[in-house]
Amino acid sequence: MKRLITLFTFAVTALSTLPCASQTTFFSAWENRVRTTSAQQPGWAVPIITPSSGIVQLVRPELTHSYTPTHFATVNYGNSKGFNFIPYYKTEVDVNLPPYIVHNNPKVRDGGGDFSMVAKYRLFSGNEKHGNYSTAFQVLWTLPTGSYNNGAAHAAFTPTFVGGKGFGIFDVQSSIGALLPVEGGNVTGRTIVWNTVAQCRLAKILWPELEMNSSFYHSGPNDGKNQTFVTTGLMISKIKLRHDPKDRLAFIFGSGMQIATSHYHAYNHALVLTSRLTF
């Protein structure tokens, strides 16, 4: 009887530890995968607006404060950013939460924006010791969840190619993509989006940057128009929260000012405040 009780106790103890061991193994494998795949690309700061040519795992709260040509200030809480994960080798999946938009205009109703997700695959890359470059392809999927015309009328896909090359303390990254509505493209229009950023690393954590953000409209109400902004910004990346070199937990923050340089523009200028927590 004592042997039976002892055997039963041992079995219960072993079974009770299985979930913990399984969870520990799962998260350890995830962390190792993130560290391994991140080490195979340059350690550039994620730009303020231009998509990164690498893959990242972080939380990204943002806020923008823009001024329209009619002199109303629009505040965007969230700026369509959210959680970026690296669930598989060379692969990133983003879950972008709907922003909340305040127009400060009695003729326009405030409300939530669209929900979106991104699937991204890093094609080729090499860290600073092996070529200092990175290329990736991503697809942004946007769902029309916005309220009171604060979002798109139809779901849309935006396939985008991103590439970057480093030259010592400098790097240049560029992306080009097309916003393609699932339906109603002739009514809402299609947009070519082109972003380019030049960055410089100073004093280990300071990343001043200069970006050009352009949109070219085809069909729809803005057919034939283009919109271009020049963005000057500064990223502070990364402030480690623990001394362990293997620990990825770090805080990143920065800001940039978008200034319209094209004749047509939806807003004159915008202040972008961004923060990121890598994990």
Image (cartoon, grey):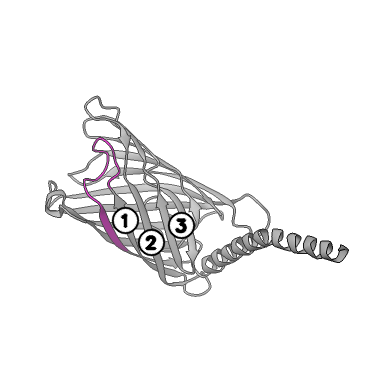
User: Horizontal and vertical percent for residue 267?
Assistant: 25, 39
Residues at circles 2 and 1 in contact by the CB criterion of under 8 Å: yes
Q: Quadrant of residue 62?
A: top left
User: Horizontal and vertical percent for residue 125?
Assistant: 45, 72
Kindly identify which residue carries mark 1. 141
Kindly identify which residue carries mark 2. 119
The type of residue carrying mark 3 is Cys
Residue ranking furthest to the right: 2
Query: Which secondary structure class fits the magenta region best?
Result: loop
For marks 2 and 1, give the CA distance: 8 Å
Task: Look at discs 1 and 3 and give the one toward the viewer.
Answer: 1
Dot 1 crowding, Cα within 10 Å, few <14, some 14–19, many 20+:
some
The type of residue carrying mark 1 is Trp
For marks 2 and 3, give the CA distance: 28 Å
Residue at 60% across / 60% down in the picture?
27
Kindly identify which residue carries mark 3. 200
